[in-house]
Amino acid sequence: MHEKLALLGGTKTITKSFNRYNPIGLEEVQAAKEVIESGVLSQFIGAWHEDFLGGPKVREFERDCAAYFGVKHAITVNSWTSGLIAAVGAIGIEPGDEVIVPPWTMCASATAILHWNAIPVFADIEPDTFCLDPKSVEANITPYTKAIMAVDIFGHSANMDVLMDIARRHNLKVISDTAQAPGALYRGKFAGTLADVGGFSLNYHKHIHTGEGGVLVTNDDSIAERLQLLRNHAEAVVGDKGVSDLSNMVGYNFRLGEIECAIGIEQLKKLNGFVASRQRAAERLKAGLAGLAGLRTPVVAEDCTHAYYVYPLVLDLEQLQVPRATIMAALQAEGVQGLAGRYQNIHLLPVFQKKIAYGSNGFPWNSELCRREVSYEKGICPVAENLNDHSYLGLAMCMHELDEADIDLITKAFHKVWAQLDLLRAPKQLAAA
Protein backbone atom coordinates (compact mmCIF):
# COMPACT_ATOMS: atom_id res chain seq x y z
CA MET A 1 0.00 0.00 0.00
CA HIS A 2 1.46 3.34 -1.07
CA GLU A 3 1.60 6.34 1.21
CA LYS A 4 -1.22 8.75 0.30
CA LEU A 5 -0.26 11.56 -2.04
CA ALA A 6 -0.01 14.97 -0.38
CA LEU A 7 -2.14 16.33 -3.22
CA LEU A 8 -4.91 14.03 -2.01
CA GLY A 9 -4.48 14.85 1.67
CA GLY A 10 -1.46 12.73 2.59
CA THR A 11 1.77 13.74 4.32
CA LYS A 12 4.35 15.76 2.38
CA THR A 13 7.59 14.01 1.49
CA ILE A 14 9.68 17.17 1.91
CA THR A 15 8.85 19.31 4.92
CA LYS A 16 11.94 21.52 4.97
CA SER A 17 12.97 24.46 2.79
CA PHE A 18 16.06 23.93 0.71
CA ASN A 19 18.92 26.35 1.37
CA ARG A 20 19.09 29.26 -1.05
CA TYR A 21 22.08 29.24 -3.40
CA ASN A 22 24.71 31.49 -1.80
CA PRO A 23 28.29 31.00 -2.96
CA ILE A 24 29.60 34.08 -1.14
CA GLY A 25 32.20 33.25 1.49
CA LEU A 26 34.66 35.03 3.74
CA GLU A 27 37.04 35.58 0.82
CA GLU A 28 34.45 37.66 -1.04
CA VAL A 29 33.56 39.59 2.11
CA GLN A 30 37.21 40.47 2.70
CA ALA A 31 37.76 41.40 -0.94
CA ALA A 32 34.74 43.73 -0.94
CA LYS A 33 35.82 45.22 2.40
CA GLU A 34 39.26 46.07 1.02
CA VAL A 35 37.74 47.85 -1.96
CA ILE A 36 35.35 49.83 0.24
CA GLU A 37 38.18 50.82 2.56
CA SER A 38 40.28 51.93 -0.42
CA GLY A 39 37.59 54.41 -1.42
CA VAL A 40 38.00 53.42 -5.09
CA LEU A 41 34.59 51.95 -5.93
CA SER A 42 35.01 52.74 -9.62
CA GLN A 43 37.83 54.24 -11.65
CA PHE A 44 36.34 54.48 -15.13
CA ILE A 45 36.59 57.74 -17.03
CA GLY A 46 34.41 58.19 -20.11
CA ALA A 47 37.20 59.68 -22.20
CA TRP A 48 40.40 58.43 -23.84
CA HIS A 49 42.48 58.35 -20.68
CA GLU A 50 44.59 55.87 -18.73
CA ASP A 51 41.46 55.05 -16.71
CA PHE A 52 39.24 54.47 -19.75
CA LEU A 53 39.50 50.71 -19.07
CA GLY A 54 38.60 51.00 -15.39
CA GLY A 55 40.25 50.48 -12.05
CA PRO A 56 42.62 47.81 -10.71
CA LYS A 57 39.99 45.22 -9.75
CA VAL A 58 38.19 45.52 -13.09
CA ARG A 59 41.42 44.89 -14.95
CA GLU A 60 42.50 42.09 -12.63
CA PHE A 61 39.16 40.30 -12.97
CA GLU A 62 39.31 40.65 -16.74
CA ARG A 63 42.84 39.23 -16.84
CA ASP A 64 41.76 36.33 -14.64
CA CYS A 65 38.73 35.60 -16.82
CA ALA A 66 40.80 35.70 -20.01
CA ALA A 67 43.29 33.26 -18.48
CA TYR A 68 40.62 30.92 -17.09
CA PHE A 69 38.56 30.72 -20.28
CA GLY A 70 41.61 30.64 -22.55
CA VAL A 71 40.81 33.72 -24.63
CA LYS A 72 42.71 36.86 -25.62
CA HIS A 73 40.18 39.31 -24.24
CA ALA A 74 37.64 39.46 -21.43
CA ILE A 75 35.54 42.61 -20.96
CA THR A 76 33.32 43.10 -17.92
CA VAL A 77 29.92 44.79 -18.11
CA ASN A 78 27.27 45.72 -15.57
CA SER A 79 24.81 43.05 -16.72
CA TRP A 80 24.63 40.29 -19.28
CA THR A 81 21.85 42.20 -21.03
CA SER A 82 24.40 45.00 -21.47
CA GLY A 83 26.84 42.39 -22.72
CA LEU A 84 24.44 41.14 -25.39
CA ILE A 85 23.67 44.69 -26.55
CA ALA A 86 27.38 45.42 -26.79
CA ALA A 87 28.08 42.15 -28.60
CA VAL A 88 25.47 42.77 -31.28
CA GLY A 89 26.77 46.31 -31.83
CA ALA A 90 30.41 45.23 -31.85
CA ILE A 91 30.05 42.69 -34.66
CA GLY A 92 28.86 45.41 -37.03
CA ILE A 93 25.15 44.74 -37.29
CA GLU A 94 23.35 47.30 -39.45
CA PRO A 95 19.73 48.44 -39.09
CA GLY A 96 17.48 45.96 -40.87
CA ASP A 97 19.98 43.10 -40.70
CA GLU A 98 18.53 39.79 -39.61
CA VAL A 99 19.98 37.85 -36.67
CA ILE A 100 18.87 34.28 -36.02
CA VAL A 101 18.11 33.47 -32.38
CA PRO A 102 16.23 30.69 -30.56
CA PRO A 103 12.91 31.42 -28.80
CA TRP A 104 13.89 29.22 -25.84
CA THR A 105 15.93 31.80 -23.95
CA MET A 106 15.62 34.90 -21.81
CA CYS A 107 14.05 37.82 -23.70
CA ALA A 108 17.26 39.90 -23.70
CA SER A 109 18.76 37.57 -26.30
CA ALA A 110 16.27 38.92 -28.83
CA THR A 111 15.78 42.47 -27.55
CA ALA A 112 19.55 43.05 -27.77
CA ILE A 113 19.11 42.52 -31.52
CA LEU A 114 16.14 44.89 -31.68
CA HIS A 115 18.18 47.46 -29.78
CA TRP A 116 20.25 48.07 -32.93
CA ASN A 117 17.12 48.19 -35.12
CA ALA A 118 17.99 44.77 -36.48
CA ILE A 119 15.39 42.05 -36.95
CA PRO A 120 15.29 38.92 -34.76
CA VAL A 121 14.46 35.78 -36.72
CA PHE A 122 13.55 32.80 -34.57
CA ALA A 123 14.88 29.32 -35.35
CA ASP A 124 13.74 26.24 -33.46
CA ILE A 125 15.66 24.27 -30.85
CA GLU A 126 16.88 20.71 -30.58
CA PRO A 127 14.51 18.52 -28.53
CA ASP A 128 17.30 16.96 -26.47
CA THR A 129 19.72 19.78 -25.54
CA PHE A 130 17.16 22.63 -26.00
CA CYS A 131 19.85 24.58 -27.88
CA LEU A 132 19.58 26.14 -31.33
CA ASP A 133 18.88 23.53 -34.04
CA PRO A 134 21.40 23.94 -36.91
CA LYS A 135 18.87 22.58 -39.43
CA SER A 136 16.37 25.26 -38.43
CA VAL A 137 19.12 27.87 -38.64
CA GLU A 138 19.91 26.85 -42.21
CA ALA A 139 16.22 26.98 -43.11
CA ASN A 140 15.93 30.54 -41.78
CA ILE A 141 18.93 32.07 -43.52
CA THR A 142 18.03 34.77 -46.06
CA PRO A 143 20.09 37.29 -48.05
CA TYR A 144 19.59 39.65 -45.10
CA THR A 145 20.96 37.34 -42.40
CA LYS A 146 24.12 38.70 -40.84
CA ALA A 147 24.58 36.76 -37.60
CA ILE A 148 23.55 33.81 -35.44
CA MET A 149 23.06 34.03 -31.70
CA ALA A 150 23.53 30.60 -30.13
CA VAL A 151 22.23 30.23 -26.58
CA ASP A 152 23.89 27.66 -24.30
CA ILE A 153 20.71 27.07 -22.40
CA PHE A 154 20.42 25.54 -18.92
CA GLY A 155 24.18 24.85 -18.81
CA HIS A 156 24.76 22.91 -22.07
CA SER A 157 26.61 24.24 -25.11
CA ALA A 158 24.96 24.56 -28.48
CA ASN A 159 26.37 22.48 -31.36
CA MET A 160 29.10 24.98 -32.10
CA ASP A 161 31.09 23.05 -34.73
CA VAL A 162 28.06 22.83 -36.99
CA LEU A 163 26.87 26.37 -36.27
CA MET A 164 30.31 27.83 -36.94
CA ASP A 165 30.50 25.86 -40.20
CA ILE A 166 27.13 27.30 -41.24
CA ALA A 167 28.38 30.77 -40.32
CA ARG A 168 31.56 30.40 -42.35
CA ARG A 169 29.67 29.17 -45.41
CA HIS A 170 27.26 32.10 -45.28
CA ASN A 171 29.72 34.76 -44.07
CA LEU A 172 27.90 35.28 -40.78
CA LYS A 173 29.09 36.30 -37.31
CA VAL A 174 28.24 34.18 -34.27
CA ILE A 175 27.46 35.30 -30.73
CA SER A 176 27.37 32.78 -27.87
CA ASP A 177 24.91 33.68 -25.13
CA THR A 178 26.46 31.52 -22.43
CA ALA A 179 24.78 33.25 -19.50
CA GLN A 180 23.79 29.95 -17.91
CA ALA A 181 26.79 27.79 -18.79
CA PRO A 182 30.09 29.18 -17.48
CA GLY A 183 32.46 26.27 -16.96
CA ALA A 184 30.64 23.90 -19.31
CA LEU A 185 32.85 22.26 -21.93
CA TYR A 186 32.33 21.68 -25.64
CA ARG A 187 34.89 19.24 -27.05
CA GLY A 188 37.51 20.33 -24.55
CA LYS A 189 36.91 24.07 -24.86
CA PHE A 190 34.81 26.28 -22.68
CA ALA A 191 31.30 27.05 -23.88
CA GLY A 192 31.10 30.67 -24.90
CA THR A 193 34.63 30.81 -26.32
CA LEU A 194 34.09 29.22 -29.74
CA ALA A 195 32.06 32.05 -31.31
CA ASP A 196 33.22 35.43 -32.57
CA VAL A 197 32.11 36.78 -29.19
CA GLY A 198 30.47 35.15 -26.20
CA GLY A 199 30.06 35.62 -22.52
CA PHE A 200 28.51 34.93 -19.16
CA SER A 201 26.10 36.37 -16.63
CA LEU A 202 27.14 37.16 -13.06
CA ASN A 203 23.78 37.89 -11.48
CA TYR A 204 22.65 36.46 -8.17
CA HIS A 205 21.43 33.04 -9.29
CA LYS A 206 24.20 32.34 -11.80
CA HIS A 207 27.21 30.13 -11.03
CA ILE A 208 29.43 33.18 -10.42
CA HIS A 209 27.50 35.69 -8.33
CA THR A 210 28.55 39.34 -8.07
CA GLY A 211 25.01 40.69 -7.64
CA GLU A 212 24.73 41.86 -11.23
CA GLY A 213 27.25 41.79 -14.05
CA GLY A 214 28.54 40.02 -17.11
CA VAL A 215 31.78 39.07 -18.84
CA LEU A 216 32.31 39.16 -22.61
CA VAL A 217 35.02 36.97 -24.15
CA THR A 218 36.57 37.09 -27.62
CA ASN A 219 39.77 36.32 -29.49
CA ASP A 220 39.14 39.09 -32.01
CA ASP A 221 41.14 42.27 -31.28
CA SER A 222 38.78 44.52 -33.24
CA ILE A 223 35.65 43.17 -31.56
CA ALA A 224 37.31 43.53 -28.15
CA GLU A 225 38.12 47.19 -28.82
CA ARG A 226 34.55 47.88 -29.94
CA LEU A 227 33.17 46.16 -26.84
CA GLN A 228 35.35 48.35 -24.63
CA LEU A 229 34.18 51.44 -26.48
CA LEU A 230 30.50 50.56 -26.33
CA ARG A 231 30.83 49.85 -22.61
CA ASN A 232 32.17 53.33 -21.88
CA HIS A 233 30.71 56.20 -23.90
CA ALA A 234 32.23 55.33 -27.27
CA GLU A 235 31.11 58.53 -28.98
CA ALA A 236 33.18 60.60 -26.53
CA VAL A 237 36.29 58.46 -26.99
CA VAL A 238 36.63 57.52 -30.66
CA GLY A 239 38.07 60.88 -31.76
CA ASP A 240 40.95 60.99 -29.30
CA LYS A 241 41.56 57.26 -29.60
CA GLY A 242 41.78 57.54 -33.37
CA VAL A 243 38.98 55.12 -34.22
CA SER A 244 38.01 55.41 -37.90
CA ASP A 245 35.06 52.96 -38.03
CA LEU A 246 32.28 54.94 -36.34
CA SER A 247 29.49 52.44 -37.04
CA ASN A 248 27.49 51.67 -33.89
CA MET A 249 29.79 53.86 -31.82
CA VAL A 250 26.98 55.25 -29.70
CA GLY A 251 28.16 54.08 -26.32
CA TYR A 252 26.73 53.55 -22.86
CA ASN A 253 27.63 53.29 -19.24
CA PHE A 254 27.83 49.50 -19.10
CA ARG A 255 30.71 49.60 -16.59
CA LEU A 256 31.06 47.11 -13.74
CA GLY A 257 32.32 48.44 -10.41
CA GLU A 258 35.37 47.59 -8.36
CA ILE A 259 33.40 45.83 -5.59
CA GLU A 260 31.70 43.47 -8.02
CA CYS A 261 34.99 42.68 -9.74
CA ALA A 262 36.74 42.04 -6.43
CA ILE A 263 33.98 39.56 -5.59
CA GLY A 264 34.23 38.08 -9.09
CA ILE A 265 37.96 37.45 -8.68
CA GLU A 266 37.25 35.25 -5.67
CA GLN A 267 34.21 33.61 -7.25
CA LEU A 268 36.13 32.66 -10.38
CA LYS A 269 38.60 30.72 -8.23
CA LYS A 270 35.66 28.59 -7.05
CA LEU A 271 33.94 28.07 -10.41
CA ASN A 272 35.35 24.58 -10.93
CA GLY A 273 33.97 23.59 -7.55
CA PHE A 274 30.58 25.21 -8.20
CA VAL A 275 30.16 23.33 -11.47
CA ALA A 276 31.42 20.03 -10.05
CA SER A 277 28.95 20.31 -7.18
CA ARG A 278 26.04 20.76 -9.61
CA GLN A 279 27.27 17.87 -11.70
CA ARG A 280 27.43 15.56 -8.68
CA ALA A 281 23.91 16.56 -7.67
CA ALA A 282 22.68 16.01 -11.23
CA GLU A 283 24.26 12.56 -11.46
CA ARG A 284 22.67 11.54 -8.16
CA LEU A 285 19.32 12.84 -9.34
CA LYS A 286 19.66 11.02 -12.66
CA ALA A 287 20.39 7.76 -10.87
CA GLY A 288 17.48 8.32 -8.50
CA LEU A 289 15.00 9.02 -11.29
CA ALA A 290 16.17 6.22 -13.57
CA GLY A 291 13.41 3.83 -14.52
CA LEU A 292 10.49 6.23 -14.03
CA ALA A 293 8.35 5.64 -17.10
CA GLY A 294 7.64 8.63 -19.29
CA LEU A 295 10.32 10.83 -17.71
CA ARG A 296 13.44 11.86 -19.60
CA THR A 297 16.38 13.19 -17.61
CA PRO A 298 18.87 15.66 -19.17
CA VAL A 299 20.75 14.66 -22.30
CA VAL A 300 24.44 15.55 -22.45
CA ALA A 301 25.90 15.46 -25.96
CA GLU A 302 29.07 13.52 -26.70
CA ASP A 303 32.26 15.38 -25.77
CA CYS A 304 30.27 17.95 -23.77
CA THR A 305 29.74 18.64 -20.10
CA HIS A 306 26.73 20.27 -18.46
CA ALA A 307 26.84 23.03 -15.84
CA TYR A 308 23.21 22.47 -14.67
CA TYR A 309 21.87 25.95 -14.17
CA VAL A 310 18.57 24.11 -14.61
CA TYR A 311 17.93 20.37 -14.46
CA PRO A 312 15.58 19.99 -17.45
CA LEU A 313 13.12 17.09 -17.62
CA VAL A 314 10.78 16.08 -20.41
CA LEU A 315 7.49 14.25 -19.86
CA ASP A 316 6.15 11.71 -22.34
CA LEU A 317 2.52 12.68 -21.91
CA GLU A 318 1.27 10.05 -24.31
CA GLN A 319 2.79 7.37 -22.14
CA LEU A 320 1.90 9.00 -18.83
CA GLN A 321 -1.68 9.96 -19.73
CA VAL A 322 -1.52 12.65 -17.04
CA PRO A 323 -1.33 16.39 -17.81
CA ARG A 324 1.86 18.18 -16.90
CA ALA A 325 -0.04 20.56 -14.63
CA THR A 326 -1.35 17.65 -12.58
CA ILE A 327 2.08 16.02 -12.24
CA MET A 328 3.62 19.33 -11.29
CA ALA A 329 0.91 20.01 -8.71
CA ALA A 330 1.46 16.58 -7.19
CA LEU A 331 5.23 17.10 -6.95
CA GLN A 332 4.85 20.57 -5.48
CA ALA A 333 2.37 19.21 -2.93
CA GLU A 334 5.09 16.73 -1.90
CA GLY A 335 7.37 19.71 -1.24
CA VAL A 336 9.54 19.68 -4.37
CA GLN A 337 10.82 23.24 -4.74
CA GLY A 338 12.08 25.12 -7.78
CA LEU A 339 9.84 23.36 -10.31
CA ALA A 340 8.75 25.20 -13.44
CA GLY A 341 6.30 23.84 -16.00
CA ARG A 342 7.21 26.41 -18.61
CA TYR A 343 10.33 28.20 -19.80
CA GLN A 344 10.18 30.70 -22.67
CA ASN A 345 8.75 31.12 -26.14
CA ILE A 346 9.87 34.70 -26.59
CA HIS A 347 8.62 34.94 -30.17
CA LEU A 348 5.13 34.90 -28.63
CA LEU A 349 5.75 37.93 -26.40
CA PRO A 350 3.64 41.01 -27.21
CA VAL A 351 6.62 42.94 -28.61
CA PHE A 352 6.88 40.37 -31.42
CA GLN A 353 3.24 39.44 -31.78
CA LYS A 354 2.24 43.10 -32.15
CA LYS A 355 5.52 44.13 -33.78
CA ILE A 356 5.67 47.24 -31.66
CA ALA A 357 9.08 48.14 -30.22
CA TYR A 358 10.26 51.71 -30.77
CA GLY A 359 7.38 54.15 -30.78
CA SER A 360 3.82 53.04 -31.42
CA ASN A 361 3.78 52.42 -35.16
CA GLY A 362 5.71 49.16 -35.50
CA PHE A 363 9.28 50.34 -35.95
CA PRO A 364 11.54 48.76 -37.18
CA TRP A 365 9.29 46.16 -38.84
CA ASN A 366 7.09 48.68 -40.66
CA SER A 367 10.03 50.70 -41.95
CA GLU A 368 12.08 50.35 -45.11
CA LEU A 369 14.80 48.86 -42.92
CA CYS A 370 12.84 45.60 -42.73
CA ARG A 371 13.07 44.19 -46.22
CA ARG A 372 10.62 41.30 -45.90
CA GLU A 373 7.70 40.11 -43.81
CA VAL A 374 9.13 38.20 -40.84
CA SER A 375 6.72 35.79 -39.18
CA TYR A 376 6.41 35.36 -35.43
CA GLU A 377 3.27 33.26 -35.63
CA LYS A 378 2.77 30.33 -33.34
CA GLY A 379 3.92 27.26 -35.22
CA ILE A 380 7.26 28.56 -36.50
CA CYS A 381 9.16 26.81 -33.66
CA PRO A 382 7.17 23.62 -32.98
CA VAL A 383 9.75 21.92 -30.75
CA ALA A 384 10.08 24.90 -28.42
CA GLU A 385 6.33 25.50 -28.46
CA ASN A 386 5.44 21.90 -27.64
CA LEU A 387 7.93 21.80 -24.80
CA ASN A 388 6.59 25.02 -23.35
CA ASP A 389 2.93 24.14 -23.79
CA HIS A 390 3.00 20.50 -22.77
CA SER A 391 6.05 18.44 -21.88
CA TYR A 392 8.85 20.47 -20.26
CA LEU A 393 9.42 20.29 -16.50
CA GLY A 394 12.47 22.06 -15.10
CA LEU A 395 14.10 21.96 -11.69
CA ALA A 396 15.89 25.25 -10.99
CA MET A 397 19.12 23.99 -9.46
CA CYS A 398 20.39 27.57 -9.65
CA MET A 399 18.13 28.67 -6.81
CA HIS A 400 19.15 26.19 -4.11
CA GLU A 401 22.14 24.51 -2.50
CA LEU A 402 21.13 20.87 -2.86
CA ASP A 403 23.02 18.31 -0.79
CA GLU A 404 22.73 14.53 -1.09
CA ALA A 405 19.89 14.36 1.42
CA ASP A 406 17.94 16.99 -0.56
CA ILE A 407 18.43 15.07 -3.79
CA ASP A 408 17.26 11.88 -2.12
CA LEU A 409 14.11 13.63 -0.87
CA ILE A 410 13.36 14.95 -4.35
CA THR A 411 13.86 11.46 -5.74
CA LYS A 412 11.56 10.01 -3.10
CA ALA A 413 8.85 12.55 -3.98
CA PHE A 414 9.05 11.68 -7.68
CA HIS A 415 8.81 7.96 -6.95
CA LYS A 416 5.83 8.51 -4.68
CA VAL A 417 3.98 10.43 -7.39
CA TRP A 418 4.92 8.01 -10.16
CA ALA A 419 3.77 5.04 -8.08
CA GLN A 420 0.28 6.55 -7.99
CA LEU A 421 -0.16 7.91 -11.50
CA ASP A 422 -3.35 5.87 -11.81
CA LEU A 423 -4.91 8.03 -9.12
CA LEU A 424 -3.89 11.17 -11.00
CA ARG A 425 -5.65 9.82 -14.07
CA ALA A 426 -8.93 9.59 -12.12
CA PRO A 427 -10.85 12.90 -12.27
CA LYS A 428 -13.02 12.00 -9.27
CA GLN A 429 -9.96 11.55 -7.04
CA LEU A 430 -8.55 14.91 -8.10
CA ALA A 431 -11.84 16.69 -7.73
CA ALA A 432 -12.09 15.45 -4.15
CA ALA A 433 -8.56 16.58 -3.31
Image: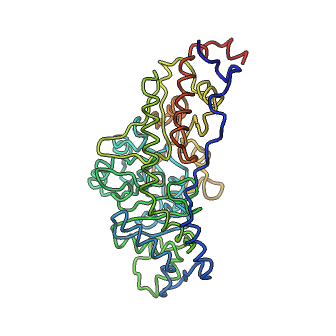
Q: Residue furthest right?
A: 432
User: Visible in this render: residue 253?
Assistant: no
Q: Position of residue 340 (x, y in %)?
A: 58, 37
User: In terms of image quadrants, where is residue 336?
Assistant: top right
Image coords of residue 373 (percent x, y): 48, 46
What coloring was used for the rendering? rainbow
Q: Is residue 334 left or right of residue 303?
A: right
Residue sitting at x 41%, y 75%: 225
- Image quadrant in which you'd find residue 195: bottom left
Image coords of residue 159 (percent x, y): 33, 46
Count up the numbered dots: 0
Q: Which one is in front, 159 or 146?
A: 159
Left or right: 428 as drawn, with respect to 301: right
Q: Is residue 293 visible?
A: yes
Vertical placement of residue 184 versus 238, above or below: above
Q: Nearer the viewer, residue 50 or 182?
A: 182
The quadrant the N terminus occupies is top right
Q: Vertically, is 261 above or below 147?
A: below
Q: Residue placed at 55% from the left, 42% from the top? A: 396
**What residue appears at the point 53 percent right and 73 percent down from the top-left corner?**
251
Location of residue 322 with respect to 302 vertically, above or below: above
Q: Position of residue 241 (x, y in %)?
A: 43, 85
Q: Point out the image quarter for the C terminus.
A: top right
In the figure, 401 relative to 383: above or below? below
Between 181 and 226, the residue placed more toward the observer is: 181
- Residue at 53% x, 54% y: name it: 206
